[in-house]
Image: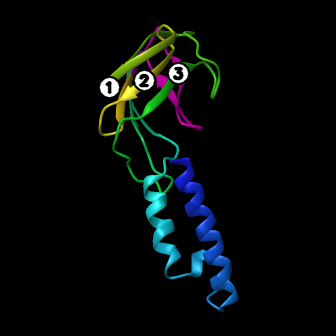
Amino acid sequence: MKNILLIISVCLTCAGLAHADAGYGRGPESDPVAMPILTNLQASVWGAPGLTPATNLLTNAVTIQAKSIAGGDLAGYRVLHVWVSGSDLGAGATNNIAALTLSTGTAISTVTTNADYWYCTAAAGSAVATVTASAAGTNYLMCADGSTVSSTPIVFTSE
């Protein structure tokens, strides 16, 4: 897959330079042939995962959805790294966390029980992380899909 993307990238660069010399513009973004190819690639290359928290007192469900770099939902199985922390983009920790459970997919490995997991999503590229706190406060849920990381604050309330 990397080789195909590299070949496409080189071809688009060469095509863009050739068309720029022919007076079509400065690169592939102004080329009527290359632009649809770029748009299709953006719809299929993964981007940062989308995180949507739903607060419910001391238990929060966070919907995780694989996204393309264009921002659309990506279907297909994805391997995600999901963890909670007391600080944004911090290391996995159980500080104020009673439980972290993932559903609609398959657990691959546990790094830290109730705090840090590797997970395979459902076929739709989605998963649900349910985080239960010990007390009111704010923690963060992070999710890595490939080399991109998203984070969201999770606010726990006692009432």
Q: Quadrant of residue 31?
A: bottom right
Q: Which residue is mark 2?
A: 119
Q: Quadrant of residue 127?
A: top left
Picture layout, residue 136 above or below residue 8: above
The earlier-in-sequence mark between 1 and 2 is 1
Give how far across and how far down residue 40 sits, in percent: 43, 64
Q: Quadrant of residue 126?
A: top left
Observer-nearest of 138 and 12? 12
User: Mostly what secondary structure, the magenta segment?
Assistant: strand
Observer-nearest of 146 and 92? 146
Q: Identify residue type, mark 2.
A: Tyr
10 Å neighbourhood of mark 1: few (<14), some, or many (≥20)? some
Q: Identify residue type, mark 1.
A: Gly
The earlier-in-sequence mark between 1 and 3 is 3
Q: Which residue is mark 1?
A: 105
The earlier-in-sequence mark between 3 and 2 is 3
Look at the image and tell me in which quarter the C terminus lies.
top left
> Residue shown at 67%/84% (left/top)?
20
Q: On the rendered structure, is 99 left or right of 86?
A: left
> Residue shown at 58%/19% (left/top)?
85
Q: Is residue 138 visible?
A: no
Magenta stretch: give its range. 130-159
Picture layout, residue 106 above or below residue 28: above
Q: Nearer the viewer, mark 1 or mark 3?
A: 1
Give how far across and how far down residue 141 sits, in percent: 51, 26
